Amino acid sequence: MTSTKGGLRMKRNKLRTILLLSLAAIIFGSPFFWMVISSLKPNAELFTWPPTFIPKTITLEHYQSALTSRGFSNYFMNSAIVSLVSMTFNLVFCSLAGYAFARLDFPMKNVLFILLLSTMMIPVQVTLVPTFLMVKSFPLVGGNDILGRGGTGLLNTYAGLVIPHIMTVFGVFIMRQFYMQFPKELSEAARIDGASELKIFRKIFLPLGKPAMSALAIFTFTQAWDDFLWPLVVTSDRSMRTLQLGLEVFKNRYTADWGPLMAATTISIAPVIVVFLVFQRYFTDTALSSGIK
């Protein structure tokens, strides 16, 4: 009798959980559904009342308009370059730093790591002006002299867009947590065999770190792809602007070109969804093992 009541309670809890998750999926997914549906409607059907949830006539004219006009393809390419380069640098630097904090012994290691983590509490707005000045005063580029004066430095360049994203403290934290789960004997056995630290990292820990690096790739790609504030500050040339800024070209002072805007927004989230789906399994494994879930 007791086991029957327990089974019924578990079924009710499971049903309640499914209903809550379904409700949350509808609430949070409905804007994306409406955006995609609107991008497939002809102009005459966009503002009809009552609204149609399934287009009477499906058209791709808004996608064609978005991709072939107003420099949208150039903005898309800029975002792709910045996101992929940022992701690559993060994988290299964060995995090396995470390995050092997790597996090597050096003076004040824990203090340095705590100081590094404390920088995560600094708002982005606080570091925005110093970062801008460093990029603008970068020596010997953009017409600058050896002291970083006289020119524009790395403003309106890919390097200027990428620099703030090349390494993240959160990435170092993920890699450190992942590498710490392996026993010390793993690296000590390699040292006894005469392997250098770089060889131990490259031959043993780098292959083992693929799941954590996959999760880091998702985080860094998404962060760089969705960044709006830094590209707005560091670029004034329209040809160097990224996709998040490029969406503004479909709006004017009083209204917006809603069809192409919905199509462009749909295109803008597609790479993030693809990256997440590709690395989804590794992302879940890493979240469980590093305790960041």
Image (tube, grey):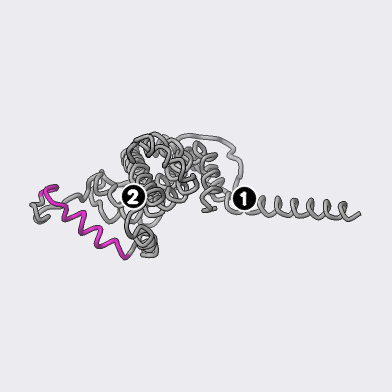
Residue linked to disc 2: 167
Instruction: Name the residue located 39 percent from the left edge and 39 percent from the top edge.
Output: 66
* Any part of residue 14 in sight: yes
Amino acid bearing label 2 = Met
> The N terminus lies in which quarter of the figure?
bottom right
Q: How far is mark 2 from mark 1, CA to CA?
A: 33 Å
Front residue (pair 25, 141): 141
Label 1, residues with CA under 10 Å away: few <14, some 14-19, many ≥20: few
Q: Residue at x 38, y 60 (%)?
A: 110
Q: Helix or strand or loop: what does disc 1 sit on? A: helix
x, y (%) of residue 180? 46, 49
Tell me if residue 242 comes above or below residue 2 in the rendering: above
Q: Which residues are magenta?
A: 126-143
Q: Mark 2: which secondary structure? A: loop
Magenta span contains residue 139: yes
User: Is residue 140 found left or right of 8 in the rendered image?
Assistant: left
Q: Which mark is residue 25?
A: 1
On the image, the x and y values in percent for residue 137 come to 16, 55
Residue 160 shown left or right of residue 271 in the figure: left
Q: Nearer the viewer, mark 2 or mark 1?
A: 2
| First-in-chain label (2 vs 1) | 1
Where residue 196 sits, quadrant-wise, is: top left
Rendered view: 204 above or below 120: above
Q: For the residue carrying disc 2, how many other residues have a C-alpha within 10 Å: few (<14), some (14-19), or many (20+)? A: many
Mark 1: which amino acid?
Ala
Front residue of 207 and 166: 207
Name the main secondary structure of what is drawn in magenta. helix
The disc label shown at residue 286, or none: none
Percent position of residue 14, x then y: 74, 51
* Magenta residue check for 189: no
The reply to whether the C-beta atoms of the residues labelled 2 and 1 are less than 8 Å apart is no
